[in-house]
Image (cartoon, rainbow, N blue to C red):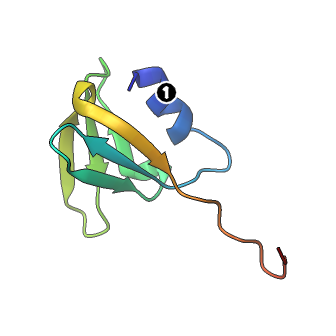
Amino acid sequence: MTLEELRAWRDASPFRPFTLRVADGRSFRVRHRDYLLVSPRGRTIIVYNDDETCNVLDLLLVTELSVEAPAPILGEQN
């Protein structure tokens, strides 16, 4: 995962929640763009949780980014 790829998903409009998976198998859900911070040099990222706790991750250990399906539009039929 590159810094540019991560920033592109974080800054996408409209934002779609995504999950980051790291090399040891743990996963971290990014519910909103404000829940993800990137260090000035881009090596470290911080993912905040709803309860105000956070996880500090090494970007080089992120192995996958999974994007959630967009929310359905009310009244729209498939």
Say few, some or many: other residues with alpha carbon within 10 Å of mark 1 (under 14 / 14 to 19 / 20 or more): few
Is 66 situated above or below 31? above
Image spot of residue 2 (x, y percent): 40, 22
Q: Quadrant of residue 64?
A: top left
User: Farthest residue toward the bottom?
Assistant: 75
Element type at mark 1: helix
Type of amino acid at the residue the image marks with label 1: Glu
Is 16 situated above or below 51? above
Image spot of residue 15 (x, y percent): 60, 50
- The number of callouts visible is 1
Residue at the spot x=15%, y=42% of the render?
24
Residue at the spot x=45%, y=47% of the render?
66
Q: Is residue 51 left or right of residue 1?
A: left
Q: Nearer the viewer, residue 8 or 76?
A: 76
Q: Nearer the viewer, residue 6 or 25?
A: 25
Image spot of residue 67 (x, y percent): 52, 50
Residue at the spot x=41%, y=23% of the render?
3
Image spot of residue 7 (x, y percent): 49, 31
Residue at the spot x=29%, y=17% of the render?
41
Q: Is residue 11 left or right of residue 3?
A: right
- The residue wearing badge 1 is 5
